[in-house]
Image (cartoon, grey):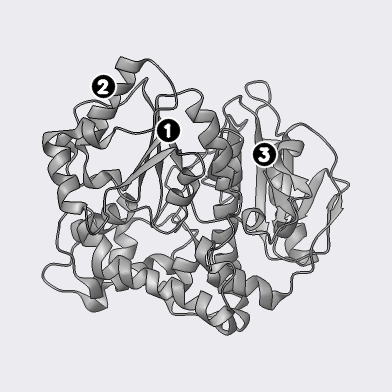
């Protein structure tokens, strides 16, 4: 039985980009729904990796690429990275036709051979990054609190769906993979384990045709999962893996594996935010370690719902990973980006959504409970007091994003408390 398509934030982004660019590249991890989303707008399609046509597609890409690009527009080129020559061919056609909305390229990896691409695509291509589904896209957030409204200074208050601790743990472990949303629990949870196995056994080597050890890839992902939400250097991960040390296991090896994981969009670290502040306190500039989805972390650690319920500290860290996924999806819809703040005095803010127009919101991520909410609000107020508003805007909003809670409301100190189950873009 074919699943009913669930609307995605990327639908809006794709339509907007097709109206302004000749070709649009949708990139992101495998299985996050890129092809299905592209198919909603495509008028014709070619699946490059079609088993019965793959060799022919490779031959035509080398010898007659324009033939593969013929068809009603927008024409979808799925898994384009297998035939990178099509990039230049599409750019040429777009230039010749002088029209927008000609092609949609989808890809789950950076091309292994960039030497086959001669042009950057500037002025012809637009880019969209897709991620696994946010809770609003999967239907597990009622969307009664809009980040857009918060940026516009509107008051928000609403009821949140009834989310139990057990249900929250399940959402963290299941992740936002579209195919799992309507599966039974056991089947859905198994998918993330299969995903990690596929990454380690195949994808991490196929991305750039460099043979990599599957067992070491599993150990690296486990170490990475233990450091989710931290600004840890390669040397720390190396130290974490020294019990498995071998002659070929160096910091350079780890860097190579991590580079491959970025190319297939498995890990997506968060850059540091560098605001104007009143004091001379140094701001830390290291990226924060994150997977693109919390389910990759749980599968890499080998933990499930009951494990999280028995270790609420770990659950809180992985709830942060899931929340960052959602915030990134929503920020894309608002033409923004998600950052992390930390200074030399130890003041740390989990997420800052910064829009292109200079507006920004400060967010602390907490599982729930009055003491944690108070802790998060104190951080937000302290950071706000440090910002030099003579040189940049004041924050549009301050928000404690929680996993549990029956209501979204505004505190007397102007900090919003918002359960993730009622948030949208």
Left or right for 18, reference 353? left
Can you give x and y, in whole percent of width and height, for residue 385 in the image? 71, 37
Q: Of 119 and 39, which appears nearest the observer?
A: 39
> Quarter of the image containing the C terminus?
top right
Q: Residues within 10 Å of mark 2 (few under 14, many from 20)?
A: some
Can you give x and y, in whole percent of width and height, for residue 191 in the image? 45, 73
Q: Earlier in the sequence, mark 2 or mark 3?
A: 2
Left or right for 395, reference 300? right
The residue carrying mark 1 is 74
Can you give x and y, in whole percent of width and height, for residue 199 in the image? 31, 65
Determine the residue positioned at 22% across, 30% down: 66
Determine the residue positioned at 54% across, 72% down: 173
- Whether label 2 touches label 1, CB < 8 Å: no
Q: Secondary structure at mark 3?
A: strand
Q: Of 72 and 233, which appears nearest the observer?
A: 72
Residue farthest toward the right in the current orientation of the protein = 412
The residue carrying mark 3 is 361
* Quadrant assignment, res 209: bottom left
- Whether label 1 touches label 3, CB < 8 Å: no
Can you give x and y, in whole percent of width and height, for residue 13 in the image? 54, 36
Q: What is the CA distance from the residue labelled 2 to the residue labelled 1?
A: 15 Å
Q: Earlier in the sequence, mark 1 or mark 3?
A: 1
Q: Check residue 384 in the rendering and tell me which mark sits there, or answer none.
A: none
The residue carrying mark 2 is 92
- Whether label 2 touches label 3, CB < 8 Å: no
Image: 280 above or below 159? above
Q: Secondary structure at mark 2?
A: helix
Q: What is the CA distance from the residue labelled 2 to the residue labelled 3?
A: 41 Å
Q: Residues within 10 Å of mark 1 (few under 14, many from 20)?
A: many
User: Can residue 274 be seen here?
Assistant: no
Determine the residue positioned at 19% across, 38% down: 114
């Amino acid at each position: 039985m074919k699943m009913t398509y669930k609307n995605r934030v990327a639908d809006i982004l794709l339509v907007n980009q097709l109206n302004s660019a000749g070709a649009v590249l949708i990139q992101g991890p495998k299985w996050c729904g890129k092809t299905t989303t592209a198919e909603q707008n495509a008028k014709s399609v070619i699946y490059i990796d079609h088993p019965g046509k793959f060799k022919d597609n490779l031959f035509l890409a080398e010898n007659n690429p324009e033939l593969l690009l013929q068809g009603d527009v927008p024409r979808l080129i799925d898994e384009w990275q297998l035939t990178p020559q099509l990039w230049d061919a599409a750019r040429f056609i777009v230039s010749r036709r002088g029209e927008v909305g000609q092609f949609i390229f989808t890809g789950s990896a950076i091309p292994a051979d960039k030497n086959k691409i001669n042009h950057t695509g500037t002025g012809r291509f637009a880019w969209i990054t897709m991620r696994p589904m946010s809770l609003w896209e999967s239907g597990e957030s009622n969307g009664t609190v809009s980040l857009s409204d918060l940026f516009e200074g509107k008051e928000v208050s609403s009821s949140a769906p009834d989310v139990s601790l057990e249900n929250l743990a399940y959402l963290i472990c299941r992740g936002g993979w579209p195919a799992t949303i309507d599966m039974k629990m056991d089947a859905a949870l198994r998918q993330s384990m299969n995903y990690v196995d596929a990454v380690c056994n195949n994808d991490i080597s196929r991305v750039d045709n460099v043979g990599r050890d599957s067992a070491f890839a599993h150990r690296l992902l486990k170490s990475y999962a233990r450091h989710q939400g931290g600004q840890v250097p390669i040397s720390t991960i190396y130290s974490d893996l020294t019990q498995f040390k071998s002659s070929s296991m160096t910091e350079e090896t780890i860097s190579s594996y991590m580079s491959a994981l970025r190319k297939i969009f498995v890990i997506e670290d968060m850059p540091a935010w560098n605001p104007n502040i009143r004091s001379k306190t140094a701001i830390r500039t290291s990226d924060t370690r994150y997977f693109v989805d919390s389910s990759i972390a749980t599968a890499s650690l080998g933990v499930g719902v009951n494990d999280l319920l028995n270790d609420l500290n770990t659950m809180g860290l992985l709830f942060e990973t899931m929340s960052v996924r959602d915030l990134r999806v929503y920020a894309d819809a608002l033409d923004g980006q998600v950052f992390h703040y930390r200074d030399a005095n130890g003041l740390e803010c989990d997420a800052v959504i910064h829009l292109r127009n200079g507006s920004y919101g400060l967010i602390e991520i907490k599982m729930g409970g009055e003491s944690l909410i108070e802790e998060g609000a104190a951080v937000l107020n302290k950071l706000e007091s440090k910002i030099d508003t003579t040189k940049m805007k004041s924050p549009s909003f301050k928000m404690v994003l929680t996993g549990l809670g029956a209501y979204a409301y505004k505190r007397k100190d102007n900090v919003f408390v918002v359960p993730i189950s009622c948030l949208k873009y």
